[in-house]
Image (cartoon, rainbow, N blue to C red):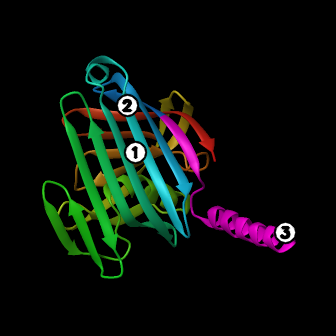
Amino acid sequence: MKPLRLLLAVALSWFTGAALAAPLPAFSARYQLLKDGSPIGEATMTLSPASGDTWTFTTRSQGTEGLAALMSANIQETSTFRWKSDLPEGLSYDYSMDSAIKQKQRHVRFDWSNNTISVDDKGQHQFAAQPGAIERHTVVLALASGLRDGKRGFDLPVAVRDHIEMQHYAAQGRQRIQVPAGEFDAVHVARTGGNGFEAWFAPDKFPVPVQVEQNDGGELMMKLEGYEAR
């Protein structure tokens, strides 16, 4: 049994070392969800090492108050990716929304052997990949990792429905932010020249945003309630 134990120990050591060497650690973070300032539910973000050099990032959102609770609205987003230097590079993305009146799915697949990206979203779409391409769900990880590395500007190639869209984000300075998890002197990051995406990070405390806002048929907001290293 000794050779087997030695092999397992080496494998475990390699796996743990690979996880620790990543730009961001594994974590689980809980958020309060609000729409137009009113609480509507809760969300959980989870980042975990997977097989080989891949990682899994999942966000689960559930409606618990008001119309969102009445409609039993639930959303799950799952991304797999690998780290390229201090930025993620996409491998797959799955989106599923389930409510009492509507169901929706969206899938993205990155085929790096053929340098193509396939998107299943209101039809099948395929287009050329670009090194470092990600999908929209993984953007917050790219921002969090870059801020920890001292970056203040980001040009991210993001796979949308039928092409690669170069999205630009920039740090806007620091703001005092109050969320259920506490009060933070946070770095405010906003997308420039695009939709109204904004996020606030405390990179010296958490590898996750402490607050996220997006205008999409109303102001949607996530406020950090709790964080746990995994």
Please check the rendered image and state whether residue 148 is part of the magenta-colored stretch, yes or no: no
Quarter of the image where the N terminus is located: bottom right
Does the residue at mark 1 contact the one at mark 2 (Cβ under 8 Å)? no
Q: Which residues are magenta?
A: 1-30
Marks 3,1: beta carbons within 8 A: no
- Report the predominant secondary structure element of the magenta stretch: helix
x and y percent of residue 189 in the render? Answer: 40, 50
x, y percent for residue 167: 28, 62
Q: Nearer the viewer, mark 3 or mark 1?
A: 3
The residue wearing badge 1 is 199
Residue lying furthest front in this view? 1
Name the mark nearer the viewer: 2 or 3. Answer: 3
- Distance, label 2 to label 3, CA atoms, is 47 Å
Q: Crowding at label 1, few (<14), some or many (≥20) Cα neighbours within 10 Å?
A: many
Q: How many marks?
A: 3
Q: Earlier in the sequence, mark 2 or mark 3?
A: 3
**Cα–Cα gap, marks 1 and 2:** 21 Å
- Is residue 208 visible in this depiction of the protein? no
In terms of secondary structure, where does tag 2 sit? strand
For the residue marked with disc 1, what is the amino acid?
Ala
**Quarter where residue 10 is shown:** bottom right
Nearer to me, 63 or 72: 72
Residue 144 horizontal side relative to residue 162, left or right? right
- Which residue corresponds to mark 3? 1
Q: From mark 3 to mark 1, how far is it between C-alphas?
A: 51 Å
Dot 2 corresponds to which residue?
62
Q: Which mark is residue 167?
A: none
